[in-house]
Image (cartoon, grey):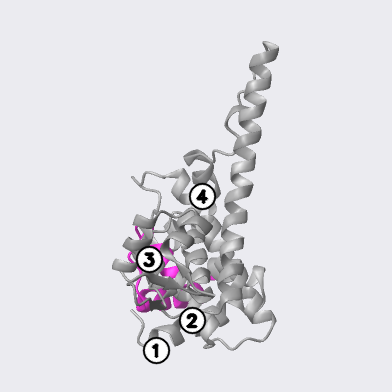
Amino acid sequence: MLYTVKEISSLSGVTVKTLHHYHKIGLLLPCAVSEAGYRLYGMKELERLQHILFYRELDFPLKEIARLLEEEPERHSILAQQEELLLLRKQRLETIIETLQQSMASMEKGEIMNSQDMFKGFESAQEWEQALEEQNQHLKDAYGYDMLDSAEIDAQSMNEQAQEAAAFMNHIAEALRTGIKHSDAEIQRLIRDHLVFMNKHGHTVTAANFAAQTRFFLGDDFHLRMLEGQQTGLAYYLTAAAESYAAAGHE
């Protein structure tokens, strides 16, 4: 079955103007054009639009969504990743909503809310400094590098990066456990998406940079223990995967 732009707009809630813009920038192309000049969309285009909307819900810019979808990854795997990222966001929002409801209840009862409960869900810069203290001390002792020196921590950005990194490493660890080869296309896609996310959040990381970083982890006792503590062989698997990705000519 084929749908017109107006029908797609009605189904998805996306405005006709936005659909025209997606066509103009090559993000969502119609599968055909009728004799009357109407753009027509099929099920494949509907699925692509759904992926676009999931990524928009996660605040991904259109340019990066186009990059993520350019190789037409397997639908189930990309849905699974989007589900994991959305669930992480949902958990944080549920905590914030609970904090909001408790604030309203306290106000209605004329009670003073516990000051510590007032900010649940809003992970602070101070909490991040505490969480990174051990790693930072190791880097200062071993390499004379203080990653927190004069660096202003953006708690919200750090929360998002931590969630994405955890999802990425969980996928890599699962691939290792299930025997997926380090050079498999699915692993290459995971690394690509991870680097896109990192660059979106202000870290200029190329494929070569990432491969060098994983080699550093492999040779550094602190980071090696951290990775191997999650999954035996993970540090070596990640390094092999990163080097394979870089060797394939990715930037």
* Residue 210 sits inside the magenta stretch: yes
Looking at the rendered structure, the kind of residue marked 2 is Gln
Q: Which tag is nearer the camera, tag 1 or tag 3?
A: 3
Mark earlier in primary sequence (1, 3)? 3
Looking at the rendered structure, the kind of residue marked 1 is Ala
Q: Which tag is nearer the camera, tag 2 or tag 4?
A: 2
Residue topped by disc 1: 248
Give the spatial CA distance, label 1 vs label 2: 9 Å
| Residue shown at the point (48%, 81%) measured from the top left | 188
Residue count near mark 3 (Cα–Cα under 10 Å), binned few <14, some 14–19, many ≥20: some
Residue topped by disc 2: 188
Specify the quadrant of the image occupied by residue 66. bottom left
Q: Which tag is nearer the camera, tag 3 or tag 2?
A: 3
Residue count near mark 4 (Cα–Cα under 10 Å), binned few <14, some 14–19, many ≥20: some
Q: Position of residue 15 (x, y in %)?
A: 41, 53
Mark earlier in primary sequence (4, 1)? 4
Secondary structure found at label 3: helix
Looking at the rendered structure, the kind of residue marked 3 is Glu
Give the spatial CA distance, label 1 vs label 3: 20 Å
Answer whether labels 1 and 2 touch (C-beta < 8 Å).
Answer: yes
* Quarter containing the N terminus: bottom right
The dot on residue 159 is 4
Pick the front one: 66 or 167: 66
Which residues are the magenta region?
Answer: 194-221
Specify the quadrant of the image occupied by residue 225. bottom right
Pick the front one: 181 or 89: 89
Pick the front one: 32 or 106: 32
